[in-house]
Amino acid sequence: MPTTVAPRPQADPDLSRTRPARIALVGERSAGVPAHTRYAPTPKALWRRERLLVDAYWLSTAQLDGPRDLAGFDGIWLVPDSPHRGEAAAVSAVRTARERDIPLPATCGGFLHGLLGFARHVCALNGAAHTENPPAARFGRHAAARGHEGTVRTEPGSPAVEALGARTTLERYPCSTLSDPRYAGTLRDHGLRFTDHDDGHPRIAELPGHRFFLSTLFQPELADDTSRPHPLVRAFASAAVGRSTET
C-alpha cells in the first residue's frame, strides 16, 4: 500500500471542500538519496506559495503490479534511482502516464527509465535495457557525478521553457546518464523531443501534446530553498491539480 509523504495542510478552512491532487512517487525511498528527503515539505510549500493542493505517496517499483496500482493518481513522478528495483514496473508507470495523459516528470535516474519506457512501448525497441540490469542492450548508462552543476539551454517554444520560465537555467546534476546516440533518432521519429543536450547527449526529453510529460537529467528536487518549489515542480503540480478537477 502507498504511504503518504506529508500530511495535508489544514490551516485553511477552505481545504475541507477541496480534493487534493494525488501524486505517486515511484521509486525506492531511501534516506541516503538527497532528492528523496526533499519530497516531504513539498506539498506544504506548494499550498502556501502557489495554492496548489497535493498529496504525495511513495510507491515502490518492487510492489507495483500494473496500471491498476496507479488508478486514482493525478500525477506520477519517476524519482531519482538507478537502477530501479523493479525496472519493468518503472517503465510500465511511464506507459500508464503517457496513455492516460497523467502528468509525469522523470528525474535523474528516472530520466533513463523514462526513455526506456518510451523506447519499449512506443518504438518497439524491446531489447532496450538499462546497462546496470543484465542482459544489457547498451541503451544507456548511469554514473555518479556528485556536486555537478550545469547550464540548461532549452529550445524556444518547448514545454520545458514554459515549465522552467526561462530558456537558460543553472541546475544540479548529481549523476550522469547517457543514452546510446544510436537510439535518439528512433525516439525522435516516434514523437519524443529532446530540448537540451550536452555534447550530443540529451538532458531533457518531452512529449509534445501531452498534458505534462517531461524527463530531465537534472534534479529539480535539489533547489536550494525547500520552501520555494522549483519551477518545474510547480508546473507539474499545476498540471496534476488541473487533472484532478476533471476527474
Image (tube, helix red, strand yellow):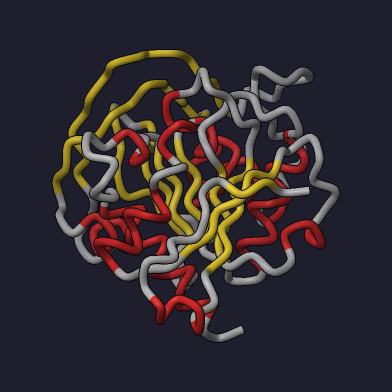
- Can you say whether 93 is above or below 129 in the image? below
Identified at 15% across, 55% down, the residue is 166
Say which of 140 and 77 sits in front.
Answer: 77
Say which of 186 and 178 sits in front.
Answer: 178
Quadrant containing the C terminus is bottom right
| Residue 21 in the image, given as x and y percentages of width and height | 53, 69
Identified at 55% across, 62% down, the residue is 75
| Residue 243 in the image, given as x and y percentages of width and height | 52, 77
**Total tally of numbered discs in the picture:** 0
- Can you say whether 89 is above or below 72 in the image? above
Say which of 184 and 55 sits in front.
Answer: 55
Task: Answer with the quarter of the image where residue 63 lies.
Answer: top right
* Image position of 45 (left or right of 23): left
- Can you say whether 17 is above or below 213 in the image? below
Identified at 65% across, 31% down, the residue is 28
Say which of 70 and 211 sits in front.
Answer: 70
* Image position of 19 (left or right of 195): right
* Image position of 47 (left or right of 96): left
Identified at 21% across, 28% down, the residue is 150
| Residue 7 in the image, given as x and y percentages of width and height | 52, 54
| Residue 33 in the image, given as x and y percentages of width and height | 49, 23
